[in-house]
Each structure stands twice: as C-alpha cells, then as structure tokens.
Amino acid sequence: LAHSAVRTAMQQQVLLSSDDQEFVGREMHLVTGRGIRSAYQMRPVLRPEMQRILVEEFYPPLTTTSVPGNMGAIVVPAADMETWVRTQKQLRGSRMLQLASIIKNLSGPRLTRSVELLAQLKNEQTEQGQKKQEGGEPENDHSVASNAETEKEEL
C-alpha cells in the first residue's frame, strides 16, 4: 500500500507541474513511522523499504535524507524531485510520439481493410450458425477460414 501511495504522490507531482512552465521542485517529505508496532519494537520496516523503492524502482533514482530529530520521516531533496519530474515529462513525450506513429500506421487504407475483413468474417460466422440451426449443411469451414487467413496475411 505504501508503495502505491509513493508512486501516486510522485505522479501527482508530474501532473501538477504545467507543461508550459519549468517545474520548481520542493522537497517531498515521506512519513514512514518509527517502527513502534514492528515485530521488533523500534526497528522500522517501512522506512528502509521506501528508501529501497526510491533508489531501485524510480528513474532517475531518488535519494533520501533523514529528518533531524524525527526517525519516522525521510525527505527527497528538491533537486532530485526536479530531475525526476523533468525526466518523466521527457519520457511521456517520447511515448506519445511512439503512440502517434502506431496510430498513423493503423489509419487509412490498412485500417479500413482490417475493419472490412473483421466484418466479413463475422458475417460468415453468423451465416454458418444460422445454417446449422436450420439443419442445412454449412459451407466448407476450411475454405472460409483459409480465405480469411490469406486476406489477413496480405495486410
């Protein structure tokens, strides 16, 4: 649960920073607790796990420091927050360009032909089902399937 909370808070930082402005980061305080209710009292479990997650599962890695006088909290420095948000925005832009390229390749004649083939295949399956219900012999299933497969391969 804590893992999801940290990821959500980090994504909110990306969303809250507007695209037309440079992100001005603030340090992020994470309250982990001191470990009072841990199996080994006063030996925190959540704190080291959060530090591990921030270093190993976030790109770029996020460093943490202790809050003086408060063993139940850690701080992600503002500089690390700024770098992480900037990197996430760049990665998002890259992913959007890849998605646009995929959509572009799907549009036009190829997309139209794919939709037509799907509709044709659905109609053929419906006709075969109706013939079976009426007691008639369905057309050669192998020729219908092979025709549809041939047309799919041509795409």
Image: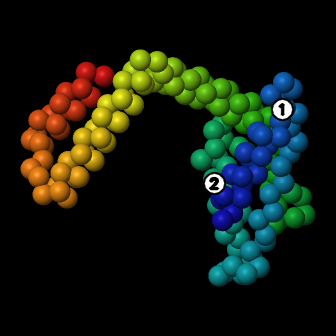
Residue 18's disc number: 1
Residue 90 falls left or right of residue 31: left
In the displayed structure, 137 sits above or below 92; it is: below
Q: Nearer the viewer, mark 1 or mark 2?
A: 1
Q: Position of residue 89 (x, y in %)?
A: 71, 30
Residue 78 placement, left or right of 59:
right
Q: Residue at x 22, y 32 (%)?
A: 148
> Which residue is the extreme one toward the right?
69
Give the image quarter of residue 117. Answer: top left
| Residue 76 seen anywhere in this rendered image of the structure | yes
User: In the depicted view, which residue is nearer to us: 107 or 72?
Assistant: 107
Q: Earlier in the sequence, mark 1 or mark 2?
A: 1
Q: Which residue appears at 11% of the width and 35% of the height?
A: 143
* Front residue of 100 and 36: 100
Q: Which residue is mark 2?
A: 52
- What distance separates the C-alpha of mark 1 from that of mark 2? 29 Å
Identity, as a three-letter code, of the amino acid under mark 2? Arg
Q: Quadrant of the C terminus?
A: top left
Q: Position of residue 119 (x, y in %)?
A: 35, 36
The residue positioned 63% from the left and 53% from the top of the image is 53
Q: Image quadrant of residue 142?
A: top left
Q: Name the residue nearer the viewer: 57 or 121.
A: 121
Q: Position of residue 24 (x, y in %)?
A: 88, 33
Q: Residue at x 41, y 17 (%)?
A: 109
Given the image, on which type of amino acid does mark 1 rest? Answer: Ser
